[in-house]
Amino acid sequence: MSGDFSAEQKRYLEGFVSGLGAMRSSRGLPPLGARGGAMPGMAPASAPAEPTGPDAAGLKAQLRTEAEGKKLDPIEIARREENGLDSYSRMKKAAKDGVYPKGPDILRWRYHGLFFVGPAQDSYMVRLRIPNGVMTHWQFASVADIAEAHGGPYAHVTTRANLQVREIPATDGIQVLEKLVALGLTCKGSGADNIRNVTGTPTAGIDPQELLDTRPYASEWHHHILNDRSLYGLPRKFNVAFDGAGLITALEDTNDIGFSAVEVRDGFGVEAGVWFRLALGGITGHKDLALDTGVIVKPEDTTRVADAIVRVFVDHGDRTDRKKARLKYVLDAWGFDKFLVEVEAKLGEALVRVPGEAVIERPASDRQAHIGVHKQKQDGLNWIGVTLPVGKMTVEQMRGIAKISRDLGDGDIRLTVWQNLLVSGVRDANVALAVAAIEAMGLGISATAVRAGLVACTGSEGCKFAAAPTKRNAEEIALHCDATVQVDRPVNIHLTGCHNSCAQHYIGDIGLIGQRVTVSDEGDTVDGYNVCVGGGFGPDAGIGRELFQDVKAEDAPRLVERMLKGWMANRSSDEESFADFTRRHEIDQLTAIFAAEAAE
């Protein structure tokens, strides 16, 4: 019969049979054609077995893709051959042999939070899971001990209110993972095609203006993910954030799912009070912020709703092109209405929708509340925001912060998406002492307007994807601008090394994305950036517009200086923000304004 097929039909059949064979192999079944299996052109002895078990949804999605005549991305095929969660015994052997992973194993190891970062560094990086960014003082100090014994010795606070430990040799990766588990911490699912660290309002439970404490909801979702293997069959990574309307934003609109606490008025057919408003589809590296769906969710229902959303994504996310394997692209293809109908089918009930006028305007965040001393809702207590140079701490500084938290605070250390941390629960009488102790370590609690909003990803010194050393260049920009221009309003400067946009350059007032810049006719290149302006988040949400291309890294500090001076000299009033200033000018106007500063 196969001779009657067209060339296109034959290619389809070959791909279909290949997919079935790989799936049978992954489940320990004999290959097609063996012990009753069917080959093309032969009547099957029995129908192919339907995938079962916790991995079934992802495997079925792969088979549907192939049945449509499409070719799976190679990573999908590798995951079908062996799920990363099943690779631990091989990881342990690799550690014993002192070897790093190769090929698909590089991705599989990431399911356990172990990242081989060669060729940038011939070592591992370990990324934790810290729901809502809250750690105890003893966990924090113990991570410092682990970093000193096996890593840098230092740690980075990430833009997902998380910690990374770097420069871990091949022999030590498993020891780090197991020591973290002994501390009540885990790295499971913190990388690869999984639901990443769950973020929440950094001041949850202590914020004087919050509508609710996000910690229990972030924690519930965190444990739900860890204990349900069926949520590890995603086409690509997935981010979820909970914002309780506190003074420090969780940047929930940059996530695939953003839950924003809101007050709902009486008289709209639903119970008045605090709900979460549901936004979907944020992925700033692809120039999209999460959009409001018109759906509100009872706080106690957030895990069920998030679970249903993720399962629709598992079923229908793109498995042929990883660049489009994100929730945004399902929403683009279907529209929100169709997507929410599918979510309701998973839930088995209707979602609650209200018009915009039913929701009371949320209290504004404070762009400076993540640094300095701030009053808590509890009488006589304060949180202290500690500044870190683009998120980096030495192990000595980590132990010192842990000791201050234990002796003078409530024992908690809270990481923020702004790559710094808070020591909470400091009594009024102990604030001055805590600040002096922080400063004695070479850290501080204040920052210039430039440093306060400075964010940088790992960069080319620690990530193979990055095109520039972002952390080093961020420091150079801050040092230069602090010495040459007195900025009197908050300004966010984000440096990211590649289009994965870990530092979310598109939402910065000024966003720089790594770019190799050609400097000779022979094609020689140097570190550099393309530069965007006018991004924002929350009520000021917006995606930055590209203004400059191919800026050499060595020229970036002076360029940023000119941009800041041009804004301050030409703004409509002292209150006009950098974002508002750039948004009311066309690109050619901004180019002329900033060029004029260079001529002076």
Image (cartoon, grey):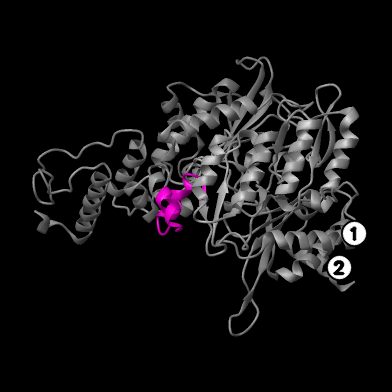
Residue 58 locus on image (x, y percent): 36, 40
Q: Residues within 10 Å of mark 2 (few under 14, many from 20)?
A: some
* Horizontal side of residue 1 vs 101, given as left or right: left
Q: Residues within 10 Å of mark 1 (few under 14, many from 20)?
A: few
* Horizontal side of residue 58 vs 551, given as left or right: left
> Closer to the camera, 297 or 89?
89
Residue picked out by circle 2: 597
Residue 561 locus on image (x, y percent): 83, 63
Residue 500 locus on image (x, y percent): 57, 54
> Closer to the camera, 546 or 196?
196
- Could one spot residue 349 in this view of the protein? yes
Name above or below for residue 38 compared with residue 348.
Answer: below
What segment is highlighted magenta in the picture?
A: 91-114
Q: Residue placed at 23% from the left, 44% from the top? A: 24
The reply to whether discs 2 and 1 touch (Cβ–Cβ < 8 Å) is yes
- Could one spot residue 192 in this view of the protein? no
Q: Residue furthest bottom?
A: 521
- Residue 249's quadrant in the figure? top right
* Horizontal side of residue 297 vs 349, given as left or right: right
Q: Tell me, for residue 304, which label it has, or none.
A: none
Helix or strand or loop: what does disc 2 sit on? helix
> Closer to the camera, 47 or 527?
527
Residue picked out by circle 1: 569
Name above or below for residue 534 compared with residue 292.
Answer: below
* Residue type, numbered disc 2: Glu
